Amino acid sequence: MVLERAYTGHLPPCQGGAPVAPPDILTFLQPASARNARLHPRIACPSLPYPGAMTDPVPLEDSESLRLARLFLDATVDLVIDRPYGSHHPRCGFRYLANYGYVPLTRAPDGQELDAYFLGPAEPMVFARGRCVGIIHRFYDDDDKLLIVPSADPVLDDAAIHQAVAFQETPGHYVLVRS
């Protein structure tokens, strides 16, 4: 039996800051013939533990963004922070609960630099350096994000990472990739 991920229709990046509904985990693990249109277009995200926030549950579909991001796993990475902690997204209006930026001199499939969350101090930053502990691999676009932590900090567990990125990442629409 071949397992496929479900996708029914367009998933807007944001609509007034409201999250797109997370499909339940069984939707992703069902054969395509057994799926139906049970994906609801908009409901609030569940609280942890996220039923759809998975860590490598099935073989990942290789993508240009994931191939690029894997080069940084376990490496020290310098970031330029263009959306500091506490700032608001320019289109969607949600508030950044982590410093968010990019790896200079990289080129992701969207034509911009490779994006990254800096899961460090809860204060606005301009630059950051840390260790890449994982990747947010999105199912519905080729725009993966690095997860960077200060080098001296302990490794975060999966639940802490899912909670830290929940302000922007929709549970069930990504997997956490670790080395």
Image: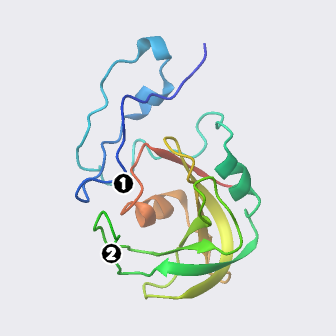
Residue 149 in sight here: yes
Kind of residue at badge 1: Leu
Q: Sequence order check: which comes first, mark 2 or mark 1?
A: 1
Disc 1 element: loop
Q: Return the x and y of residue 154 as percentages of the image width and height.
A: 62, 76
How many numbered marks have been drawn onto this rendered protein structure? 2
Quadrant of the image occupied by residue 93 = bottom left
Q: Who's the residue at 42% across and 56% down the image?
A: 169
> Residue 24's x, y, as percent?
37, 34
Q: Position of residue 126 (x, y in %)?
A: 53, 88
**What secondary structure is found at the residue carrying circle 2?**
loop
Identify whether 66 is placed above or below 6.
Answer: below
User: In the displayed structure, does residue 126 sit left or right of residue 122?
Assistant: right
Question: Which residue is depicted at the point 50% across and 88% down?
Answer: 125
Q: Residue at x 38, y 73 (%)?
A: 96
Q: Amino acid at mark 2?
A: His
Q: Nearer the viewer, residue 158 or 93?
A: 93
Q: Is residue 179 visible in the rendered structure shown here?
A: no
Q: In the rendered view of the protein, which quadrant contains the N terminus?
A: top right
Foreground label between 2 and 1: 2
Q: Image check: 156 left or right of 30? A: right
Check disc 2 and report the residue beneath it: 88
Give residue 148's quadrant in the image: bottom right
Q: In the displayed structure, would residue 116 be above or below residue 44?
A: below
Q: Nearer the viewer, residue 110 or 54?
A: 110
